[in-house]
Image (cartoon, helix red, strand yellow):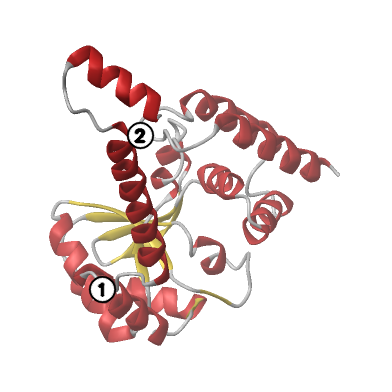
Amino acid sequence: MIALQEAEQRRLGLPLNFIGDWQNQIDHLLLQEEAKHHLAAVPIQLPEPWYKKIEKQECSAKSMRHNVTKADIEKFLDALGKSFHKPGRLYLAGAALVHIGLRSGFTMDIDVAIEASDEDEMVTAIRRLVEKMQINVEFASPGDFIPLPTQWMAQARYVGRYGSIDVFYFDFYSLALSKISRGNERDLIDVQLLFQKKLITLEELDAAYNEVLPRMGKRPYINLNPQRFAERYALIRQKLQE
């Protein structure tokens, strides 16, 4: 290093200092490394984002509400029919199996999809009932998670009329496919129950599956893995045939 420095000084006639430059770089790197270790040892405590506080409050409010039974679902539908007086449709999704008596006991919340001449007013009426009855109602349906078969609306089973609202069970084939997509144990048991009680047939389930599979992984369902869904479907189909 010294010889190189002297040769370059003679060639260029400049007071180059390779050793000093090299030492400066070493010192700089050492300071950077020390700073990294110091930051790792003493993490910066940032204030909690405002939206996290709201999320915690909402989760706390939900946890204080009681689980929903078949009788609670019926009371909710009856009360909604009396408080919302315009034409509308309500599709029971997550709570359908409890309301129809397929699953005994209770569900954590009532998942619904709505159509109304004034949906904002219907949503407001539902939210008021949520607070009054202390139950959880979610605006969610299979269409939020998977592509829907084109005939889902025609295959929705009619429950009854509550005031000016027509209530349906969301298409059971869509429900079954969304449960297969999630793939947890409770959902797969529900699919078996739907099949055992003859609310779905294997032939019609295959038809719905073959229709929606090509749309898996495409907008707005880009987060769905078609191959994984196909594997899950093959497994549950085999189980249904046993």
SS state under label 2: loop
Q: Which residue is mark 1?
A: 48
Residue 220 got which mark? Answer: 2
In this rendering, which labeled residue sits more in front, label 2 or label 1? 1
Which percent across, then down, holds residue 31?
Answer: 33, 55
- Residue 204 seen from this side: no
Residue at image x 79%, y 39%?
Answer: 238
SS state under label 1: loop
Q: Amino acid at mark 1?
A: Glu
Q: Amino acid at mark 2?
A: Pro
Quarter the C terminus occupies: top right
Residue at image x 54%, y 34%?
Answer: 225
Residue 119, placed above or below residue 47: above
Residue at mark 2 to residue at mark 1: CA–CA distance: 32 Å
Which percent across, then down, holds residue 210?
Answer: 58, 25
Q: Quadrant of residue 133?
A: bottom left
Residue at image x 79%, y 45%?
Answer: 239
First along the sequence among labels 2 and 1 = 1
Which percent across, then down, holds residue 118?
Answer: 13, 55
Is 235 displayed left or right of 143 in the figure?
A: right
Quarter the N terminus occupies: top left
Q: Quadrant of residue 213?
A: top right
Is 118 displayed left or right of 90 in the figure?
A: left
Residue at image x 32%, y 25%?
Answer: 5
Residue 162, placed above or below residue 62: above
Depth order, front residue of 7/129: 7
